[in-house]
Image: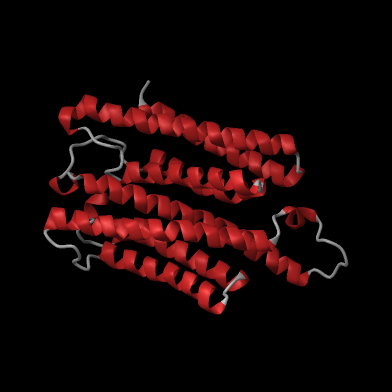
Amino acid sequence: MESGLLFNLVTVAYFAAMLLFFIYLATRNNTVSLLATLTAVSGFLLQTAALGLRWYESYQLLGSDGRAPLTNLYESVVFFSWSIVLIYLLVDLKYKQRTIGAFIMPFALFSQAGAQMWLNAGIDPLVPALQSNWLTYHVITCFLGYAAFALACGVSIMYLIKIGKEEKYQGDGPMGGLLGFLPPTRVLDDINYRAIMIGFPLLTLGIITGAAWANYAWGTYWSWDPKETWSLIVWFLYAAFLHARFTRGWVGRRAAWLSVIGFAATIFCYLGVNLVLSGLHSYGS
């Protein structure tokens, strides 16, 4: 079986999981929530197998030049999708808030489906700048951090929706309807904070390993390439989030908005810089 077929099955599984999470939001049926989670787990396991198979295929096609499936835009987007589901499933184990899946699985689905529909899935020889083990360390740490930021963004959107309605709610009892079914705002705020506490050190490691890789490939640790500059901007945004949280007690709405803005900057750093701006990382397109 080819990895491409498995990746197509992953797209179907993530689409089904997203639909089931939406149905769970509407029905509040625990059986549906369990089925949605099991579907997401199945898609994750399929994707893990597909990544391993693609790794094997690279050795079949390129011989000793085979490599981990992390070296071009297609592979990085697929790995991003895999990382999002991994982080979500770990959070689900701790918090058991299944409604979060309806806001997180779309990130994984759009990443996976976008890679399948629009990106070149070919396995080509590496350019010299990519022939380093530092590449693997850099990509893994960065994208696990990006995935944590995606989760933080998803729960922040939930928080902003719910807090906006709660402030307008005039009833005496708990809020009913769909919004009343979402996790409490304090839980969403806590998940946002903890996700960024996971993502920030991973991003830091990603920048450090990227600098080591840059020195190996180009003879300098830092050259103010657009990718490097935007990585630093993203780092400062999340550092500002944590600083404001620790020193000024920023919680709730302000923290949620900063998380959403930080993830928007992350996506531009990841895709916008590679596809729009020119620089040392342009080969990523």
Task: Relative to 11, say whether 206 is above or below.
Answer: below
The percent position of residue 7, horizontal first and vertical second, equals: 42, 32
What colouring does the structure picture have? secondary structure
Q: 198 or 272: which is nearer to us? A: 198
Task: Relative to 13, say whether 102 is above or below.
Answer: below
Asked if residue 3 can be seen in this view, the reply is yes
| Image position of 75 (left or right of 26) | left
Q: 163 or 22: which is nearer to us? A: 163
Q: Residue furthest top?
A: 1
The percent position of residue 100, horizontal first and vertical second, equals: 62, 50
The percent position of residue 53, horizontal first and vertical second, equals: 34, 27
Residue 189 falls in which quadrant of the image? Answer: bottom right
Q: Residue furthest front?
A: 246
Task: Relative to 234, say whether 206 is above or below.
Answer: above
Residue at x 44%, y 57% (from the top left corner): 199
Q: 34 or 23: which is nearer to us? A: 34
Q: Residue furthest left?
A: 219
The percent position of residue 279, horizontal first and vertical second, equals: 21, 61
Residue at x 60%, y 47% (from the top left corner): 94
Q: Which residue lies furthest to the bottom in this view?
A: 248
**Which part of the image, by quadrant, shows the N terminus?**
top left
| Image position of 181 (left or right of 19) | right
Asked if residue 109 can be seen in this view, the reply is no
How many numbered callouts? 0
